[in-house]
Amino acid sequence: MIQQFSHRRLNRLTGEWVLVAPHRTKRPWQGHEEGKSERNTVVYDPACYLCPGNARANGIANPDYRNTYTFVNDFSALIENMPAFDLNDSGMLIARSERGICKVICFSPQHNLTLAEMDLPDIESVIRTWQEEYKTLGAYPFINYVQIFENKGEIMGCSNPHPHGQIWAQETIPVEPAKEQAQQLIYFQEKKSPLLQDYLQAELGKKDRIIYENDRFVVLVPFWAVWPYETMILPKSRLQHILQLSARDITDLAGAIQVLTTRYDNLFKVSFPYSAGIHQAPTDGAEHSEWQMHMHFYPPLLRSATIKKFMVGYELLANPQRDITAETSAAILRDLPAKHYSKL
């Protein structure tokens, strides 16, 4: 029944509901189609402001870096030095200043390498850079949350094809992590165990939404997924934040990222777009025993490389909705080869 008819699923991590309507995949598509995302084959682009040695928009030249490279975003949404203000006009017009630091992380000096095409040691280097930045930025007294993320592909608003991600560190805990914290805290206070660890055990017992697992991590389509090929990477052990990763954890997390992103590319034989990010404990000095770190992947493609899932109408005004079940998308991703299509 759950695979055939409309139903709602509860997102235990946010407390929100998603509508699942699997029969809608049968409807004909005559709407907009995106241009197919082609693989980038240029190793070095003299016009790219992220390639080694090139000047960025502000005139600063990148060093001739050989591994990962980070710098403060030249067009930061959040800035460190700004006047504090607090507006409350009649209890209706409310605004507060927000300090922060935004950084860019170049994953590789090579212009054409995405995470899916990078060697495992190079992905491990990216993870170690994430650790360093989480530690450094989280140590600022005014930084209470560090959001690590990547937007991949033009369809996701990525302004440069050079493999890179971002970090926004700020005073307050953003909306999505705050929702997750609230639900994890409620569960932890009641059950005395982390919500996501118990959820993972339930998924490991079922197996039908699991895509890949190694000794330390599991890649799965969440039961409550909204996006057609949404996934999550979960650690098998208790890990509140990225600084608790051991050397073996880093290797296995890199392996999970490599397998997942490769299968994404293999799905439609394109450089698969997505937004991805790590949710983990805030850096506000509290213990946060309720937290279990995890990584979300939100890809927008639906039926092919050119058909996008749009969050409009009902999704914006009423409730998130998906057209294929989590079990169906997990089976599709699970059956794809783990070797990149360009190397087959």
Image (cartoon, helix red, strand yellow):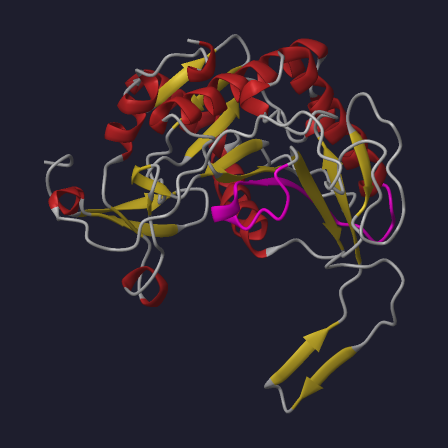
- Seen from the viewer's position, the closer of residues 11 and 298 is 298
Foreground pick, 47 / 277: 47
Is 159 above or below relative to 152?
A: below
* Residue 158, position as x, y percentages in the image: 58, 46
Describe residue 74's horizontal placement relative to residue 325 as left or right.
right
- Total tally of numbered discs in the picture: 0
User: Seen from this angle, which residue lies furthest bottom?
Assistant: 90
Q: Quadrant of residue 328?
A: top left
Query: Which residue is drawn at the image coordinates 45% and 13% (left, top)?
Result: 213
Q: Position of residue 322 (x, y in %)?
A: 27, 46
The quarter of the rendered structure image containing the N terminus is top left
Residue 334 lies in the magenta stretch: no
Residue name at image x 64 percent, y 34 percent: 289
Seen in the picture, residue 215 relative to 240 is either above or below; the reply is above
Of residues 11 and 155, the one nearer the viewer is 155
At x 37% / y 12%, what residue is drawn?
Answer: 337
- Against 80, is 168 above or below? above
Q: What span is colored magenta in the figure?
A: 139-161
**In which quadrant of the rendered image does the C terminus lie?**
top left
Residue 151 belongs to magenta span: yes
x, y percent for residue 90:
64, 91
Residue 205 x, y percent position in the rendering: 32, 17
